[in-house]
Image: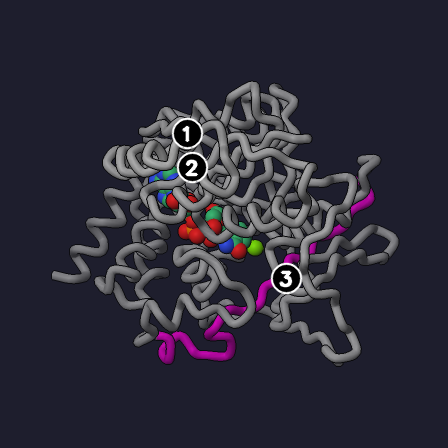
Amino acid sequence: MKNITILGSTGSVGRATLKVLDKNPGKFRVFALSAKSNVEVLYEQCLRHEPKYAAMLDEKAAQKLRDRLAQVGSSTEVLTGDASLQVIASSSDSDYIMAAIVGAAGLLPTLAAVKSGKRVLLANKESLVMGGQVFMQAVRECHAELIPIDSEHNAIFQCLPHHGGHSVHRILLTASGGPFRGWSHERQHSVTPAQACAHPRWSMGRKISVDSATLMNKGLEVIEARWLFEVPPGRIEVVVHPQSIVHSLVEYIDGSVLAQLSNPDMRVPIASGLAWPERISTGVQPLDLCSLGHLDFEPPDMKSFPCLPLAIQAAETGGNMPVVLNAANEIAVQSFLDGLLPFTSISDVVGQTLDMMPGSTPDSIDEILECDRKARAIAKTVISRAAA
Ligand code: NAD
Ligand code: MG
């Protein structure tokens, strides 16, 4: 029986994780759950899974949850505030931590989980994009077992040689192409948040859905892969594969290419990470290759989706550039979702913020967070200047 903490349990990955646990009774116990402010969903999750702790970032929401749980005599203890996430992430009573908070907010809790030397199931890609070297150094020093949950990275993890060695030539990172594949940049100008969040293959949170529509998500994933697998960005190739069946591939020096395939459903990588190196059931439909008929592959359209080359450039430059890219993107995506920025301006805001921010090499978490704050301020200025 493994004790599990889920950071971001009310989100898309968090809920999919609980579904996998439901499918495997007797193997896992929920130790702690957490959310930003969604009382309704966290309350239902607490009743069903009876965690020892439930942490909510928002204090008012935490009080509401506490009151409701008290009314039904629940023994779950409700914690609140930033620090509470780090407390549940690093508790010695937990065996596995699912890091499924969205955005930079996940950095400190995910790092706390890594520093506790546990198995960390990493969905929160932004923490690795920001933390890079510092994050991976903590993984090594604290003997954490980092298992990628992002579907592409989980596929690569499954295809890599587990005896080590230097026989990998390239990593082929697949991308669905998002809802606007084949659209020119001009045609994307009037895209609405509802259109951008309607992904053709995956049902996900709003931020990652927009990132998938701009292809920034694939750029963040190049940076994520660079750190997870210690492969220089020049040896990571993005391939558009609209069916999202082949989740990524590893090419070896002898010309062999290994791939992991499944129907597009996050329960597959989540179950793989939970059970690794064993396998558990997920409830996901088996793959029917004959009814699929064909699998298509094409190069990404860098001109119509400028976020992807911006991210690849930031990966190649390194230093603080991935931190700036991520911060500017989070601000721009939120402005777009709030109806304050056209879809095609997301890449403009990111590009201008990267140009305006002086290069540096942050080598501590405090320096990374300082760089994140500065880049957010610049991105907000860029947006307000454009609106004036
Ligand atoms: P989501 O928006 O559906 O859920 C986010 C979760 O984080 C929620 O539980 C929310 O309460 C919590 N949260 C948000 N802001 C917070 C804050 N400031 N402090 C504490 N908690 C906060 O997002 P998602 O789609 O589940 O994605 C989560 C992460 O997983 C992202 O980093 C995303 O890139 C990555 N990911 C998601 C998918 C997917 O299929 N959804 C696939 C691959 C990777
Ligand atoms: Mg992915």
Closer mark to the observer between disc 3 and disc 2: 2
Tell me which numbered mark, 3 or 1, is placed earlier along the sequence: 1
Say the numbered circle drawn on residue 274: none
The residue labelled by disc 1 is 85
Tell me which numbered mark, 3 or 2, is placed earlier along the sequence: 2
The residue labelled by disc 2 is 34
Mark-to-mark CA distance, 3 and 2: 31 Å
The image quadrant of residue 2 is top right
Whether tag 2 and tag 1 are in contact, CB under 8 A, the answer is: yes
Question: Residue at left 55%, top 38%?
Answer: 98
Question: Residue at left 20%, top 49%?
Answer: 381
User: Magenta span has 187?
Assistant: yes
Residue 362 in sight: no
The image quadrant of residue 275 is top right
User: Magenta span has 239?
Assistant: no
Give whichever of 103, 85 is nearer the camera. Answer: 85
Closer mark to the observer between disc 3 and disc 1: 1
Q: Name the image colouring.
A: one colour
* Residue farthest right in this picture: 254
